[in-house]
Image (cartoon, helix red, strand yellow):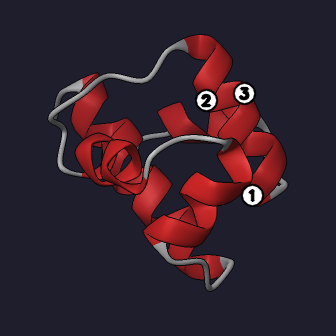
Amino acid sequence: MSLREIVATNLRQMRHAKSLSQEELADRAGVNRNYIGMLEREEHAATVDMLERIAAILEVDPIEFFRKAD
């Protein structure tokens, strides 16, 4: 599993856990909704700064984006 795939999967799961739509998360992060969708579909790789911003919104440690599911 690629790192991009791990980040995409974790982002989607964490977003769902907070009951946020892609649009809601994007609005809070100050980005276009399409950007969040592209991250979740592995079409774009987020910067470290963006992952830090999204992690703050989701109230998780940014390292959680990189944890591979068992």
Which residue carries the number 2 mark? 51
Residue 29 point in image, percent of width and height: 68, 45
Q: Which mark is residue 58?
A: 1
- Is label 2 in contact with label 3 (beta carbons under 8 Å)? yes
Are there few (<14), some (14-19), or many (20+) residues within 10 Å of tag 1?
some
Give the alpha-carbon distance from disc 2 to disc 3, as whole Å: 4 Å
Which SS class for mark 3?
helix
Residue 69 visible in rendering: no
Which SS class for mark 2?
helix
Say which amino acid is labelled 1. Answer: Leu
Q: Is residue 34 left or right of residue 65?
A: left
In percent of the image, x 19 and y 38: which residue is there? Answer: 42
The mark that comes first in sequence, 3 or 1, is 3
Q: Is residue 43 left or right of residue 25?
A: left
Quadrant for residue 30, please give it.
Answer: top right
Q: Nearer the viewer, residue 33 or 43?
A: 33
Residue 34 point in image, percent of width and height: 31, 51
In percent of the image, x 42 and y 63: which residue is there? Answer: 12
Q: Which mark is residue 52?
A: 3
Say which amino acid is labelled 2. Answer: Leu
Give the alpha-carbon distance from disc 3 to disc 1, as whole Å: 10 Å
Whether 40 is drawn above or below 45: the answer is: below
In percent of the image, x 54 and y 41: which residue is there? Answer: 31
Residue 45 visible in rendering: yes
Quadrant for residue 19, please give it.
Answer: bottom right
Residue 39 point in image, percent of width and height: 32, 41
Q: Nearer the viewer, residue 1 or 46?
A: 46
Q: Nearer the viewer, residue 1 or 8?
A: 8
Q: Is residue 43 left or right of residue 30?
A: left
